Image (cartoon, rainbow, N blue to C red):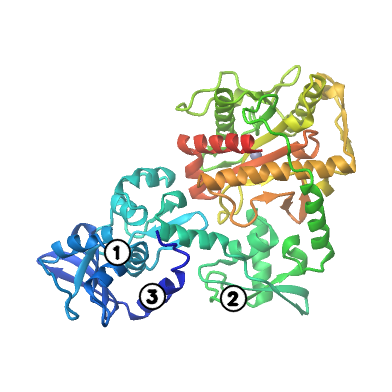
Amino acid sequence: MRCPRASGRTLSALLAIASLAVAASLSAAGGNLRKTVVISPELKVVLGEGDEVALSARPLPGEGVDAFVQRLTESPKAKREIFAQNAGARLLRKDVFVSVPYGLLSESYRKIAMGALFPDDRADASGWNHRVAALAGKPESLWRIAEWFTGKGANYREIREVGPIASLQTEAGQVVRIPTALLSPAFRGEVEAAAAMPPMPLEFGKDEKGRYALYRLRRGEALYSAVVVRFTGRVHAEDVNAKAAEIAERSGIADVHAIPVGFPVRIPVEDLVAEFKPANDPARIEEEKAKLEAAQFANRVRAADLSGVTFVLDAGHGGRDTGARVAGVEEARYVYDLACRVERLLARHTKARVVATVRGGAPCGGRNSDPGDFRTARVMTTPPYPIEDPAAGVNFRWYLANSVLRSAEANGGSEEKTVFVSLHADSLHPAVRGSMVYVPGEKFLKGSFEKSGEIYAARREVREAPRVSFSRKERIKAEGLSRDFAEKIVAAFRAADLPLHAFAPIRAYVIRGGRQWVPAILRYNRIPARVLLEVCNLNNPEDRKLLVTRSYREKVARSLVSALVEF
Ligand SMILES: [Zn+2]
């Protein structure tokens, strides 16, 4: 099979010609609408009745029949079929177009045909986005879309499931996403290129307000996501909007929704996340050093069936604390269900010991059950804590986690074989989507901390060890091991085509309202490998739709379990 990358140059040259020379026409022949796009004097693509696609081609100067068939199909065997379909034509004449059905075309020509018919389609890091065009009068079917981009019409089911797409009937303008794993090689190559495209280097300059980084917007990029979210790390709506307004003003942008491609946008250097600061910036140097140092502590424990591993599984919120609530979707309900799914999969497929930090009044349901009752959830300290106050609910969880670690160590386990995950769903700027993993940034773990008061003193886990502090080595080790685990989670999610935060899916701190910190559940937790997983952004409608489906939650649970096994 031809490598799609190797043919990239020819292909993009052809597509450039296509976009210049395309002359589209609709014709009504015998009442059947057809669409023809002329790509070059020798090449047309035709969309016929029932959305049959064919290329119509003439030989290049001096090209014989075998070379012609080879060029378009990469398969000499296609010759008979092509000529059988062209009214018995046996000879190639330079003035007669020969029709080649889509199914016989080579990968490169398939991409050319689709590029000519559907110029609004886009590849991004997570797949191919087909915009339903209804070229021949009625919207193209999911079956056809699956056939064109994956080679198999029956794949429409999976496309529908990951969409998720409610109706079998598509509508003009609807975007159908085809996940990377299903795509045939030519389209997958484009997705991989989009994912690997490094961000444009920033130039640095100075104006009356101080130093700035200059970024030129690319086609299809918006100020919110491509600039503010990517370069300043802000994700909460109020932060993103405020910073976008500030950057727009400084850059002389009158309308943030109509910024021309290539427009120079000025981002204050002090707002850049460390990795985008100038190479000699002390904050960037410090962060790179910290990351390198932490990388020494990558996990070296291997236990494929997870025997001897203790997994502390924390469903965020619960009880009276619903967590984020958007359009009737409550965070606590779905992350509780997700935790149940993870626990079931671990019990079935591994020998890990699972300790759930919270439990509801009713037992967890199975794979096909709806989310259980999170309102009766209590933190499983001794005695349990019915979650009345969200902050106390969080504190009891990390006290419990620390107690689990102590008893694991006392029973011959090691801290390397204890892992902690807290499950949440975020409510961020609607332009942000996908999962994010928080790890404890070393520099935010300094100092010591303890809680006092009656409700705390009443619980064994607090009395055992009320105060928490970390040595420098413990802080670095925690960041290193947690990053290692977070990378496995990101890799597993990527492999399963689950949406991930586009620019920085792993984060060592929260940025909000001009402050930076590590969430308390990680901040005071002594289990070295500990992450907080935000499974989606509830303010993003696509993410929200996914979270309420069982299939998405089951897929997230499976990916988390495989990340744990990898780790
Ligand atoms: Zn939460």
- At label 2, counting other C-alpha atoms closer than 10 Å, the crowd grade (few under 14, some 14-19, many 20 or more) is few
Q: Residue at x 56, y 26 (%)?
A: 349
Specify the quadrant of the image occupied by residue 13: bottom left
Amino acid carrying label 3: it is: Leu
Q: Furthest residue to the bottom?
A: 61
Real-space CA distance between mark 1 and mark 3, rounded to the nearest whole angstrom: 16 Å
Amino acid carrying label 2: it is: Ala
Q: Does 141 sit left or right of 241 as displayed?
A: left
Q: Residue at x 17, y 81 (%)?
A: 95
Of mark 1 and mark 2, the one earlier in the sequence is: 1
Real-space CA distance between mark 1 and mark 2, rounded to the nearest whole angstrom: 50 Å
Q: Secondary structure at mark 3?
A: helix
Q: Does 195 sit left or right of 121 as displayed?
A: right
Is residue 24 something that shows in the picture? yes
Q: Does 155 sit left or right of 230 as displayed?
A: left
Q: Secondary structure at mark 1?
A: helix
To which residue does mark 2 refer? Answer: 254
Q: Nearer the viewer, mark 1 or mark 3?
A: 1
To which residue does mark 3 refer? Answer: 14
Specify the quadrant of the image occupied by residue 324: top right
To which residue does mark 1 refer? Answer: 73
User: How many numbered tags mark residues here?
Assistant: 3
- At label 1, counting other C-alpha atoms closer than 10 Å, the crowd grade (few under 14, some 14-19, many 20 or more) is many
Q: Nearer the viewer, mark 1 or mark 2?
A: 1
Specify the quadrant of the image occupied by residue 69: bottom left
Of mark 1 and mark 3, the one earlier in the sequence is: 3
Does 129 appear above or below 68? above
Contact between marks 1 and 3 (CB within 8 A): the answer is no
Amino acid carrying label 1: it is: Thr
